[in-house]
Image (spheres, rainbow, N blue to C red):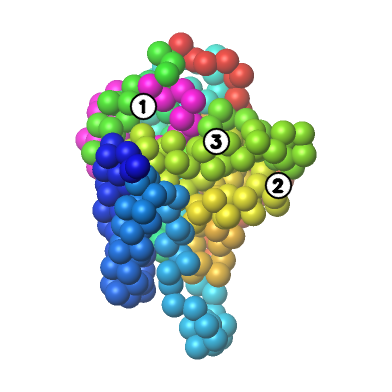
């Protein structure tokens, strides 16, 4: 017997999925409508919310779609650089933590360099123009994200994407309440999964505890979708740790993109991206100056050369792997 409550969640998900498929570039509107019908039928039959298919699977396939692609020169010009913040407590002893004042001045410094922030969704779907684009993401779902959004990001027109792990949302006093998350989603912040318990989702976990490995990917997806009433199609590897099996399972679970922690840009020319290993950079207190210097060089290079993005040198010692304190921040 279908459960009315989950049936309603299913219909909400269908609507959200329909809206989402409408944003996929080059997706014929017929495919989008067909996806809605398929999704709705699946929900009606199952009487509950079902796993959503990756929208990319709806794009036109076949040789004719690829022939013109192959001969086109690579376009390095249109690119975005994804940043990742964590918490906003103002603790100077934590490399990943900043006060709201520090966050505000960071954003203003980046703007003064000539950068603008675009939404993660725009970057992922190739809606990128020029070389001075940044994307704000915030990992984990700490309770300080709400004041950071309301007092710092919102007035600057920035909608950070939130990569969250459901074990703590609405469960731990140090993390976002479910209603706070809803406020942020309603304000236009996109969301994605960041594990379920924030484990190291690697080949080692796959071998030692396959159920736990799968929960970090599959259960994380349905739980985030339930929390946000939106499709969760972006996966951010907890600790930035992953193996090939992680990428494969993330794709199999229906995520369209995987965010890693590694140097580099996301390009509008999707042939330059590995969409399950997209580069992202953690904002760290002791590497902030190096980050600004790097981004300044990227601006200068774009001015002079026009096309070639900056790459890291050994001496930059940047970016560092994601840091994790191992205990919740109060
Ligand atoms: Zn994390």
Quarter of image, res 195: top right
What secondary structure is found at the residue carrying circle 2? loop
Q: Is mark 3 within 8 Å of ligand 1?
A: yes
What secondary structure is found at the residue carrying circle 3? loop
Q: Which residue is mark 3?
A: 195
The Cα–Cα distance between marks 3 and 1, rounded to whole angstroms, is: 18 Å
Q: Residue sitting at 54 percent across and 43 percent down?
A: 218
Q: Which residue is mark 1?
A: 145
Q: Residue sitting at 72 percent across and 33 percent down?
A: 209
- Above or below residue 249? Residue 271 is below
Q: Which mark is residue 10?
A: none
Neighbourhood count class around disc 1 (C-alpha, 10 Å): few under 14, some 14–19, many 20 upward: many
Range covered by the magenta-colored residues: 147-170
Do the residues under discs 3 and 1 have CB atoms within 8 angstroms? no
The Cα–Cα distance between marks 1 and 2, rounded to whole angstroms, is: 29 Å
First reached walking from the N terminus: tag 1 or tag 2: 1
Magenta-span inclusion, residue 162: yes
Do the residues under discs 2 and 3 have CB atoms within 8 angstroms? no
Q: Which residue is mark 2?
A: 243
User: Which of the two residues, 317 or 230, is positioned nearer the viewer here?
Assistant: 230
């Amino acid at each position: 017997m279908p459960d009315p409550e989950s049936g309603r969640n299913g219909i909400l998900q269908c609507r959200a999925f329909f809206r989402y498929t409408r944003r996929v570039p080059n997706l014929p509107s017929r495919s989008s409508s067909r996806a809605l019908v398929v999704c709705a039928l699946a929900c009606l039959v199952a009487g509950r919310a079902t796993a959503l298919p990756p929208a990319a699977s709806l794009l036109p396939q076949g040789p004719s779609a690829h022939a013109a692609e192959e001969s086109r020169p690579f376009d390095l010009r249109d690119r975005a650089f994804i940043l990742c913040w964590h918490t906003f407590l103002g603790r100077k002893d934590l490399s990943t933590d900043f006060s709201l004042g520090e966050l505000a001045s960071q954003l203003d410094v980046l703007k003064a360099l000539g950068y603008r922030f675009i939404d993660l969704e725009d970057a992922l779907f190739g809606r990128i123009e020029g070389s001075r684009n940044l994307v704000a993401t915030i990992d984990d779902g700490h309770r300080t994200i709400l004041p950071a959004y309301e007092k710092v990001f919102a007035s600057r027109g920035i909608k950070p994407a939130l990569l969250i792990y459901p074990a703590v949302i609405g469960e731990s006093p140090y993390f976002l309440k479910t209603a706070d998350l809803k406020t942020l989603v309603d304000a236009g912040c996109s969301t994605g999964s960041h594990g379920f318990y924030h484990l190291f989702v690697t080949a080692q976990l796959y071998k030692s505890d396959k159920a736990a490995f799968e929960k970090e990917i599959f259960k994380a997806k349905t739980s985030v979708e339930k929390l946000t009433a939106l499709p969760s199609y972006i996966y951010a590897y907890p600790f930035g740790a992953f193996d090939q099996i992680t990428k494969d399972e993330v794709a199999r679970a229906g995520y369209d993109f995987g965010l890693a922690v590694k140097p580099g840009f996301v390009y509008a020319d999707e042939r330059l991206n590995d969409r399950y290993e997209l580069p992202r950079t953690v904002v760290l207190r002791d590497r902030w100056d190096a980050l600004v210097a790097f981004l300044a060089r990227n601006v200068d290079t774009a001015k002079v050369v026009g096309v070639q993005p900056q790459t890291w040198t050994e001496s930059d010692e940047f970016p560092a792997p994601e840091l994790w304190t191992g205990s919740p921040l109060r």
